[in-house]
Image: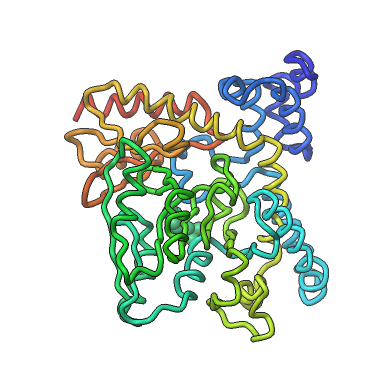
Amino acid sequence: MLTRRGFLQTTGTAGAAALAVFRDDGIARIEAAARYAGHRSADEAASDENYWREIQQAFTLDRTIINLNNGGCCPSPRVVHEALKRYLDISNQSPVYHMWQILEPNIESVRRRLAAAFGCDPEEMAITRNASEALQIAQLGIDLKAGDEVVTTNQDYGRMLDTWEQRVRRDGIRLTKVSFPVPPKSMDVLAERLLAAITPATKVLHFCHITNLTGQIFPVKQIAAEARRRGIKTVVDGAHAFAHFPYTAADLGCDYYGTSLHKWLLAPIGTGFLYVRKENIPSLWPLTPAAASRADNIRKFEEIGTHPAANHNAIAEALTFHEGIGIERKAARLRYLRNRWADRLGRHPKFRIHTNLDPAHSCAIGNVEMIGVPTGQVVSQLWEKWRIIATPIVHAEYTGLRVTPNVYTTLEEVDTFITAMETIAAAG
Ligand SMILES: Cc1ncc(COP(=O)(O)O)c(C=O)c1O
């Protein structure tokens, strides 16, 4: 077992560790850090700054800004970005050979590893360019006729709602958007709202595994099981869920699941996946048409024409980095960072937290409103005076700042955010 002293000898002092980012041993250092943290619970490791310093230094960031918008897309660790660049260089030697013959076939290794991490059969795993593409394959590929109904929420992602709205205009389907409380007192409320909206015309339920607006986690299994019992298909938007907190496909039980990999997995920009339950593959039309002979093959959803192999192959390196930390430890750290600011601001009379902080309800993402100060104004001041990036959320039913740290975020950065918020509130 690696002791703290052994760990520090392996990784060096803080000064030497700062140099590590320039060396090509990122994964080895993460593994050494993992061995060091391995004998302690995820919650104990969550507050061990010696461990997290190694993770922080695995990235090549601009530390003159504090990026608390990791809900948009995230920087990759250096090893992942190096892999991306390496594969691009290899491709460019002679793409028809090096990219198509050498790199592209290795997408199968990525499929196998992603399927193992998600807990499905590789033959149910399609690799896409983002969550939008993954979800739109499902949304536009399910046969629906005029009058058929899709039930979703009014806090689902705008593009996904736009996609259903287009089917309303084009195919004459009906779209019902339910509202739910923010924050909800229980998970049951979320299931009840969606299930209560079902009518005899309902063919699809579409909802987030975790919302991008407040970071609310939904009881996917409860909803999907009931939908299945009633013969209704479930499309689950997992854009923010994969590699964020622990779960597998068996914990969900949905029909279709789309996620981004350039968010919490820290894979290159332009990566995502679509899970299609095996029984649904033959009847789901791909977004970009494929030969009839491929109707039963999950790869029919990847027929997008010429594209870089580098992006999807570098997912393998991101999985290795992710597994080096471990999902339990990562989720515990993300909650630790989120609680550091949310507990403090939550006790302050000028702030209202729109996220239920119970670990079953949320993880890294939190939403906070500064009472009496317009959200846009808070965002501008954070940027102009403090160089802090956070996301304004202005919903018809509430407003607030979405704050999302990541594994590379330091305590000093979180504390600067707290100070900035308290300063703006005191002035405003
Ligand atoms: C809930 C949700 N769904 C879908 C998406 C789309 O993801 P992507 O940009 O990877 O297509 C996002 C992006 O932020 C999101 O937050």
Q: Quadrant of the N terminus?
A: top right
Relative to the observer, which residue lies in front, 331 or 248? 248
Residue 343, placed above or below residue 362: above
Question: Which quadrant of the figure has residue 426?
Answer: top left
Q: Residue at x 58, y 56 (%)?
A: 269
Residue 39, placed above or below residue 218: above
Residue 335: percent from left, percent from top: 48, 30
| Residue furthest to the bottom | 292
Residue 275 horizontal side relative to residue 371, left or right: right
Residue 188: percent from left, percent from top: 35, 42
Q: Residue at x 74, y 37 (%)?
A: 26
| Residue furthest to the top | 5
Question: Which quadrant of the figure has residue 104?
Answer: bottom right
Q: Residue at x 46, y 55 (%)?
A: 224
Q: Quadrant of the C terminus?
A: top left
Residue 34, placed above or below residue 39: below
Residue 358 horizontal side relative to residue 48, left or right: left
